[in-house]
Amino acid sequence: MAASKSKMKTVFFCNECGYESPKWVGQCPACHAWNTMTEERVSTQKEKSTGNSVFRETAERVIASVNDISLEDEKRISTGMEELDRVLGGGVVPGSLTLVGGDPGIGKSTLLLQACRLMGNAGSKVLYISGEESLKQIKIRAERIGTFSGPMELMCETNLGIIEETIRERKPDIVVIDSIQTMFLEEISSAPGSVSQVRESTGVFLRIAKGLGVSIFIVGHVTKEGTVAGPRVLEHMVDTVLYFEGDRHASYRILRGVKNRFGSTNEIGVFEMRGEGLIEVKNPSEHMLEGRPKDASGCIVSCSMEGTRPILVEIQALVTRTSFGIPRRQAQGADYNRLNLLMAVLEKRVGLSLGDCDAYLNIAGGVKVTEPAIDLGIVMAVVSSFRNKPLPFTLAAFGEVGLSGEVRSISQIEGRVREAQKLGFESCLVPATCKENLKGIKGIKIYYVASVTEAIQYFGEL
């Protein structure tokens, strides 16, 4: 009788890649990360659910030539939200598995509930499964968002066996799982949210999505480092990974695709959080520049490309003499190390005495910009604040700055200049190497600069 019972054993899992080891090791043998092994108790009983093929719904093995495969019947499902469709690559692909991550309270559940409402009202069968909220709590949030008139169903469950059975019975078009950390398989003895539970649960949803052609959205909590909690293999298993970013105390939210098998990974969607839910921001540049101060030193506008979309952002710099022995440097929305690098270039190549100055950099609007195309804007803002001389209100600057003080070429320069022109800017500082690409633009004054020194010399003319 005792021999028929499943025995328990202790194993160690890597939090980064999911590697399983019978004993603890300091460095993971698979991904070589240090101190990532966590101890868990698992059953020695053979798990039948994880050994089956992802495509087990297919009765027979099919081998076909790539030229014989037709995509005419593969139509994407529109979410009803242009910003979300943009990030997904044009809509939801049938049979896809999408992971949505973000900080607590950022609006992940609100975004997916709004998308479910719009898709349900358009005729798609939607099943929203929550492991964190009751049906009444979801209803309270749904009433704030709007009217639900389509075939949308709610379910509160965490047992993956029951969920899989329900999906096969109801046959929905769209399924939302909120969240993956609350789901559990009875065959696995570890607690919900553990490495083994998250990995195996995702495998089950992957099999359901590919086998039944159901589009599944999975909500994933993030760690303090900003990555989805659980093994990194989770992100490799899904088709699309979306991160919902932004300060929870600010109104703007950015949905960024970091992995997409069906579209570009550089697109972003911009939303504004209001009382009635998330509102799409169709023209982010205009919203980001609202309330910009006039005749204030240390302020300039630059442009960042997010996929095919140019977004104008305001760069603010404050440079002042320090009261301490070591100057303080701080950057909000931009790379802190990049600020130090550019200030070193100004000291070495231009001769500005910034070694005894505190420097603070801010990208207004709560957005994060990592593109080097804003380097020239940062340089101009720092010099403007250091000299306490305002820059023209209708000036924009974009270009990458090298360690020799040169202003290097950037991509899609024409789209950046046209976006600035559309919003009423009268002049632009751009790299001299981009001159050939801007010959067809009229109605805006363009200053071509080859170095930081040359750009600063325009202070007398601007």
Image: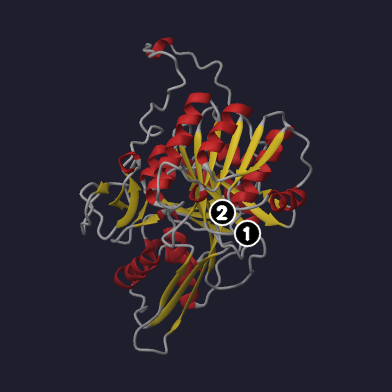
Quarter that holds the N terminus: top left
Q: Residue furthest front?
A: 1
Depth check: 172 or 66 in front? 172
Left or right, residue 299 beside residue 456: right
Q: 10 Å neighbourhood of mark 1: few (<14), some, or many (≥20)?
A: some
Depth check: 201 or 416 in front? 201
Tell me the element at label 1.
loop
The structure residue drawn at horizontal position 48% and vertical position 45%, both measured from the top left corner, is 184
- Name the amino acid type tagged 2: Leu
Q: Position of residue 261 (x, y in %)?
A: 44, 33
Tell me the element at label 2.
strand
Q: 10 Å neighbourhood of mark 2: few (<14), some, or many (≥20)?
A: many
Q: Position of residue 271 (x, y in %)?
A: 63, 51
Q: Which residue is mark 1?
A: 289
The structure residue drawn at horizontal position 32% and vertical position 61%, both measured from the top left corner, is 405
Q: Quadrant of residue 365?
A: bottom right
| 3D distance between C-alphas at marks 1 and 2 | 7 Å
The structure residue drawn at horizontal position 43% and vertical position 46%, both measured from the top left corner, is 198
Whether residue 92 is visible, yes or no, is: no
Left or right, residue 234 beside residue 159: left
Residue 353's place in the image compared with 205, above or below, is below
Depth check: 348 or 231 in front? 231
Residue 53: numbered disc: none
Q: Please, which colouring scheme is shown? A: secondary structure
Depth check: 43 or 325 in front? 43
Q: Quadrant of residue 43?
A: top left
- Name the amino acid type tagged 1: Leu
Left or right, residue 206 beside residue 145: left
Would you say the residues marked 1 and 2 are in contact, meaning their CB atoms lie under 8 Å apart?
Answer: yes
Labels 1 and 2: the sequence-earlier one: 1
Q: Which residue is mark 2?
A: 312
